[in-house]
Structures are given as structure tokens and as C-alpha cells.
Amino acid sequence: MTKKTVTRFAPSPTGLLHVGNIRTALFNYLYTIKNNGEFILRIDDTDLERSNDEFAEQIILDLNWLGIRVDKIYKQSERIDTYKKYFNQLVEDGFLYECFETQEELDYKRKRLISRRMPPVYDRASLNLSKDEKNKYLDEGRKPYWRFKLSGKKIVFNDLVRGEVVVDTSTQSDPVVVREDGGFLYNLPSVVDDIEMQITNIIRGEDHVTNSGIQIEMFSSLGKNAPIFGHHPLLVDENGDPFSKRNAASSIKSLKDKNFEPMAINSLNISIGTAIEINSFQSLKEISDILDLSKLGRAPGRFSLDQLTKLNSSQLSILNFKEIKDRLKTENIAAYEPLWEIVKNNIDFLSEYTKWDKIINKDIKIENFDNEFLKLAADSLPNQPWDEKTWNLWIEKIKASTDRKGKDLFLPLRKAITGLEDGPELKELILLIGYDKIKRRLLGE
């Protein structure tokens, strides 16, 4: 029987999610959709000092806004007893050992190794401490922390993105799994939860490749097979720098507040650095149908706000009025289908719709700059009622009275009627603005 696909996204609630975090969430979610599986959100909040409930709530809001539907939600802070059970098992089986070095002592060892041009790998000084030596440290008031003992072997696994991957654990320090204060660090809770939640596939950034090799050993120590891993290329900003939770401008919340469309963010995020052509996709299902993790590139994807803005404009242009109507009403904006169909190809953000609503429906004062020509244009306005032929009739009448053409003809009319130098076609706009308002604007009234 084929095992159900189960993926997970496990962010730490220590800041706002940025586009780099969401890239990982998207790859997992799209893989889940493609395989009719289950998508789990696991809040990694074991670091109680740095974790924040508001950030945890915002993570859920961000995912929902982007269209990423979560099947189950877990908080690691509510599962400490489970981790303790597995911790005790690993101690009993000899896979964990207690250490007594202070942070200053560890820093000294590290700096000394680096100064000698040697890899800063932990020397396992605490591995063979006698009972008396341990008691001596305890009498000094030192509290033990715990490390997982690596095998020193090469771990080989097949990566969904990179193909065969080899991690040499002999080049790695035995990872710390429990702090002096008894708090659990990332690796052990992650492995335990992946086992208990029956995670089948883990897709995450390429900065986790070595970590995956270490975790595979942890799975083995608990008598379990590891999930299938995939490590995608990371995102960088326009300057080539990694995204950080410290930079609020790159957060999903910030992009939402700037009126970017969720599917524009999703489309760009998942396309750059991949074989997928950068395009405005209408749904995550549409992307999942063409996603092939084995065809992801290796180079970091450069996430550009300029490119996102262009994609946002393209995204709006493919939305029909039915899709946008309720959103406009929610924001107390008059939803008018003829106006939407005219302006949707000329706006970068939905918020710009209100500008055109004002131009069409409100009395606005526009400073005229070519009064003689505009008075002639006002006198040349065709009689009502107007239809799709009105524009051409009007322009031909103006041409017959002047020698103007091209920009000299159209730009003064556009600026007088809309106050802007560009926008939708005037032949469509004038039908919405109407005779009376256009005449007043041409005359500067």
C-alpha cells in the first residue's frame, strides 16, 4: 500500500516570515498538492525566550493569505514531555553524552583550532569523563549539556533536488541537543516530530544539507528510516544578500501592507532560479501541476521588488470583476465592472483603482495649460448620447479645426480630462466620465 505523502513547514516564531521562509513553505505545499497529501504547520517554539505568540499567530495569517492551506498545526512547546521520553531512550542506548565545558571554554577551543587552520570540530573531551570527574564539575556548580554522538561515517542519501548527496559526519561536531538549562535545541525535537507525525518528505533550504545528514543518523539511532529530503536553492535580495527576519521590509506582512497580490508573490517566489517561466499564475494548483523539484537550479534566486511589481500588474490584469468585487467592497471602494475592465491593465496595485474611481466619478479640479486648444476641443464635443463611435467623431472634428496630430493632439486632452499623462485608452474613459464632466474639465471649471 502506498504511504500517504505528509510534508511539514516548521518555522520559528522569532520574527516575521520573509519571502525566503515562504519559499520553503511553498515547495512543501506544492509537493503536497501534487501528491494529494497532508501539509502540517509545526511551530518551532522550544526557545521560549526568543519565541513570541504574536509571531506564531502572524505565521498562520501569512500562510492563509498566500493560499497555503494547513491541515494540522502543532506547537513544539506543547510536546516537551514527548521529547523527554525520546531523550531518555537515546541516553539509555548510549547515543547521547553529557558535557561540562563552559561557553568560554568552547569558544577558546574553537578559536585555537581556527588559528591553526584546522576545522573547528568539537574534540569530545567530555565523552570519556569518569564518574568522579563529572561529580567534580557538578560540585563546582556546572550544569551538563548533552550532545548526540555521530558515527563518523559518510551518510549518503538521494535528494529530490540535488540527486545523490554525501555528508561526512567525521567533519562535524557532535550536535548539542539539550542546553544546560534543560531546553531542547532544534535537532532532536525535529526528528521526534517527524517520526510521530509520519512525515514522508522534507523540503527545505540548501543550508540544511549537512543538518539532514546528522538527522538521518538520529532517525537511525531511534530505529526509524528518515523521510525523503529535498534541498532547494535559497533566495537572495536585489543586492545578493540573504533575507533575514531582522529586515521587516522583506516580510510577507510588509508586502501585503504594500498591496502586493498573494499570487504575484507566490508566482515569483517559486519561479526564480527554476525551470518554470516567470509568469502570473492564477492558483497554486496550477504551479503544482508543472513543478519538478529535480529541475530546480543550483544558483540562488534573486528576488526583486521591481520584478514583483511588474508581476503584480500582470496578476491584476488577469483578474475578472467577480474575483475583485468583494475585495473592493470590503475596503469600502465602489465596485464598478466597466471601470475595472478598463483600468485593470493600467495599474500596478489594486489600491490604484481608487484613483481612477475618483477620476471617473468625482468632480476634480484640473489645471489647464492649453486653454485655447482645450476650449476648441470642448466646443467640438459630439452631442449626446455617446457610444463607441464618439471618440473618433470628436477627434476628427478637432483635427479639422487644427493642424495637431499625435502627441500634440492627444496629450493635452488626456491631461485635461484625467490630470495624468498616461492611462487607459481615452476612447473608453470618456464614455464613463461623461459629457458634462469632460466639458467642465476642458474649460477648467
Image: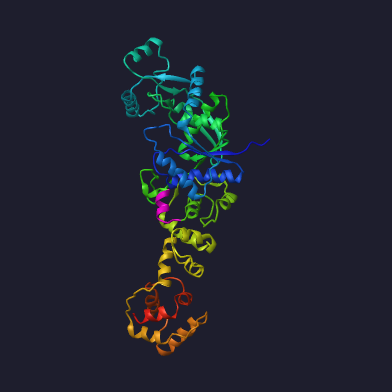
Is residue 235 or residue 281 the one in the foreground? 281
Magenta part, dominant SS: helix
How many marks do you count on the picture?
Answer: 0
Residue 34 appears left or right of 241: right
Q: Residue furthest right?
A: 1
On screen, residue 85 above or below 334: above
Q: Residue furthest bottom?
A: 401
Is residue 86 or residue 444 the one in the foreground? 444
Colouring: rainbow
Is residue 247 or residue 150 the one in the foreground? 247
User: Which image quarter holds the C terminus?
Assistant: bottom left
Give the residues drawn in magenta, as a range: 252-260
User: Which residue is found at the position 37% from the left and 12% from the top?
Assistant: 135
Q: Position of residue 439 (x, y in %)?
A: 40, 81
Taking the image as drawn, is residue 368 in sight? Answer: yes
Q: Position of residue 280 (x, y in %)?
A: 52, 57
User: Which residue is found at the position 54% from the left and 24% from the top?
Assistant: 222
Q: Is residue 257 magenta?
A: yes
User: Which image quarter holds the N terminus?
Assistant: top right
Taking the image as drawn, is residue 406 in sight? Answer: no
Is residue 182 or residue 440 the one in the foreground? 440
Q: Position of residue 272 (x, y in %)?
A: 48, 51
Q: Position of residue 298 (x, y in %)?
A: 49, 45
Q: Is residue 277 magenta?
A: no
**Quarter-of-image position of residue 365:** bottom left
**Quarter-of-image position of residue 121:** top left
On screen, residue 408 above or below 54: below
**Quarter-of-image position of residue 407:** bottom left
